[in-house]
Image (cartoon, rainbow, N blue to C red):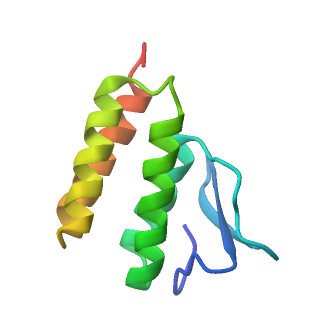
Amino acid sequence: MVAGKASLRGVGLRVSSNGVSASETTQPTTNQQSPRVEIEALLAALLGDTQPAEITAAVGQLEAAVNQDGETPAAVVTEVRKAIGLVRSGQPCAGVSALLAARSELDTPGS
């Protein structure tokens, strides 16, 4: 996990088996990421010291990833939508719980 303050502005979050790491970017990321990557990025943002506007952007990126990916299991989509609703309604802790449930669904064999 990235130590210190987490900021999504100008930083690309990358997910690997070792956790989430950050790398500087010179332009905003416009290409679509997988729902797994976006779930990890939003979790990192919510668990870090990230500004609300950056969390809002991460929520939008996750929503777009789930809406455009036709291969995401229904249970994952349900949990992600629940998490998005919770974060948008000012309940980030409950949103983290829903994101963890979505991630768990992705890790379930057959998903």
Quarter of the image for residue 105 reads: top left
Pick whichever, 93 or 16, lies toward us. Answer: 93
Is residue 82 found left or right of 54 in the rendered image?
left
Q: Quadrant of the C terminus?
A: top left
Give above or below for 109 relative to 66: above
Give above or below for 58 relative to 18: below
Pick whichever, 47 or 62, lies toward us. Answer: 62
Residue at the image position 25 percent from the left and 66 percent from the top: 88
| Rendering coords of residue 82 (x, y %) | 22, 47
Q: Tell me if I can see residue 73 in this picture.
A: yes
Q: Quadrant of the N terminus?
A: bottom right
Residue at the image position 40 percent from the left and 71 percent from the top: 56
The residue furthest right is 26
Residue at the image position 37 percent from the left and 70 percent from the top: 46
Q: Tell me if I can see residue 39 in this picture.
A: no
Quarter of the image for residue 11 reads: bottom right
| Rendering coords of residue 18 (x, y %) | 62, 52
| Rendering coords of residue 84 (x, y %) | 29, 55
Give above or below for 87 relative to 79: below
Is residue 82 found left or right of 100 in the rendered image?
left
Pick whichever, 12 or 64, lies toward us. Answer: 64
